[in-house]
Image (spheres, helix red, strand yellow):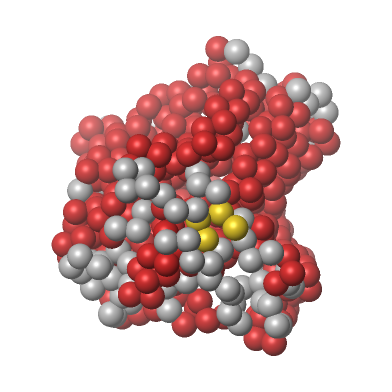
Amino acid sequence: MSFASRPAGAGGSQRLALAVIATSALMAVLDGSIVTVAMPSIQSHLGFSSAGLSWVVNSYQLAFGGLLLLAGRLGDLLGRKPVFLAGIALFVAASAVAGAANSPAMLVAARFGQGIGSAASSAVSLGILVTLFTEPRERAKALGVFAFTGAAGASIGQVLGGVLTDALSWHWIFMINIPIGLLTLAAAGKAIPADRGAGLRSGVDALGALLVTGGLMLAIYTVVGTATAGWASARTLGLGALSALLIAGFFGRQATAASPLMPLRILRSHGVAGGNAVQMLMIAAMFAFQIVVALDMQKVLGYDATRTGLAMLPAAVAIGAVALTVSARLIARFGARTVLVAGLVMLIGALALLLRMPTHAHYVPDLLPTMVLIAGGGLAMPAAAGLGMSGAREQDAGVVSGLYNTTQQIGAAFGAAVLSTLAAGRTAHLLRAGHDPADALSSGYHLAFTIGIALLVAALLVAVFGLRGAGAGGPEAAADADTAEALRQSTSGLDLAPTA
């Protein structure tokens, strides 16, 4: 695949392309969080059962997480720009159906469609980004912007969801995607350069696609279901074993297929393997902050949805300030691995501060320090993204981008299921023992913070011992030699044939 040659003065076009990619990422993240505060209103208007209501979120997660890897490979074969545009168009159309939904089945189906659209656009976003920004420092800045939109999206979504639901109706949390998506689609057509994929003749690996899509969807479905079925239930163990079998079959297929969906060579890169492992652990851990802290504010401290979202905004501002202003310079000077380690240490400190939070906490002394220290995410996320993409050949950029987004979704689903289940179990145990409800809830949340710290420590160990030699600093910190050479070739119009 090769992008068309770009003139030296294409900086404005690059910035517009970055804005388009960041906006698409923001819409995908927003759509996962904006719906949470509107759930009671949706249930009341459409008549969802308590169990069925969860599928407003789960149907989106299933499609999004399960199809990322396939979408990434299709980007390499068909061209990343066409797949990106198709994803945005489908997301806008599905948003219109969701906003007009008048039954539970219609809304769940529309949410599944939104997930497919988000998977298509998100899977190729990083591949487009690293191909557009070939200079290490500029790429690091672009990754900082991309990371900020993901980190800020959930917090913005909580505020926006509450405001739109209260001021208008829940329908508008979906309808707002239509004008934003159409503007993004129009800008993307102009800003993102045309590219040529390897072509479907190179092989789609239909069996591999079926195995990995089925395995990932089943894995996410299994993890999400633990909230009601429990971890040791026959349902969880049976479905978990089946999903593991499908994914193992996928890896076996990739080792023998003539045109694999995910060439196993990409995992031989320490940056790709380690960056994805760190991201999955880090995202799982940050559920303890993103969701559990919000639950603590509402259920223990008595905040409403809008006040909770506003209380979380300093965290988004802190992450954004670091990601957009200093992360690129630090990565260029000290290397992505060093910056990643520093960011993880800050995140561990942020969650550690929450362990001392009393039941009847006050915002400024008890919560605000964490909101500031969470700025470590503005260091860790761009560094992990750079490392996760660093070993990708140009013709594999789409599938590596899809893999990185897949591990993000798996980490989010795993963190949500594990932390929420264990926290709820601790709370239920204390309530049965006669403890005060607020104290029982607070104790459950503290357990979630502790598990989050353990996951971040595991991520730190991977970064320290598993990423040696990756992102070592200096002017080539943001891209290894193979990537830099491939990207130089791509900008000169040289078509790179895929290799097995």
Residue at image location 53% in from the left, 71% down from the top: 496
Q: Relative to 312, does residue 433 appear above or below in the rendering?
A: below
In the rendered image, residue 245, in percent from the top left (x then y), is placed at: 73, 78
Q: Quadrant of the C terminus?
A: bottom right
In the rendered image, residue 414, in percent from the top left (x then y), is placed at: 56, 60
The residue lying toward the viewer, choosing from 15 and 417, is 15
* 130 left or right, relative to 72: left
Residue 200 in view: yes
Residue lying furthest top in this view?
Answer: 167
The residue lying toward the viewer, choosing from 454 and 461, is 461
Residue at image location 38% in from the left, 65% down from the top: 488
Q: Relative to 292, does residue 239 appear above or below in the rendering?
A: below
* 100 left or right, relative to 89: right
In the rendered image, residue 226, in percent from the top left (x then y), is placed at: 66, 59
Residue at image location 65% in from the left, 63% down from the top: 77
* 293 left or right, relative to 347: right
Q: How many marks?
A: 0
Quadrant of the rendered image containing residue 409 = bottom right
Q: Relative to 81, does residue 401 appear above or below in the rendering?
A: below
Residue lying furthest bottom in this view?
Answer: 256
Quadrant of the rendered image containing residue 279 = bottom left
Residue at image location 66% in from the left, 81% down from the top: 254
Residue 424 in view: no
Q: Quadrant of the N terminus?
A: bottom right
In the rendered image, residue 114, in percent from the top left (x then y), is placed at: 68, 40
The residue lying toward the viewer, choosing from 292 and 103, is 103
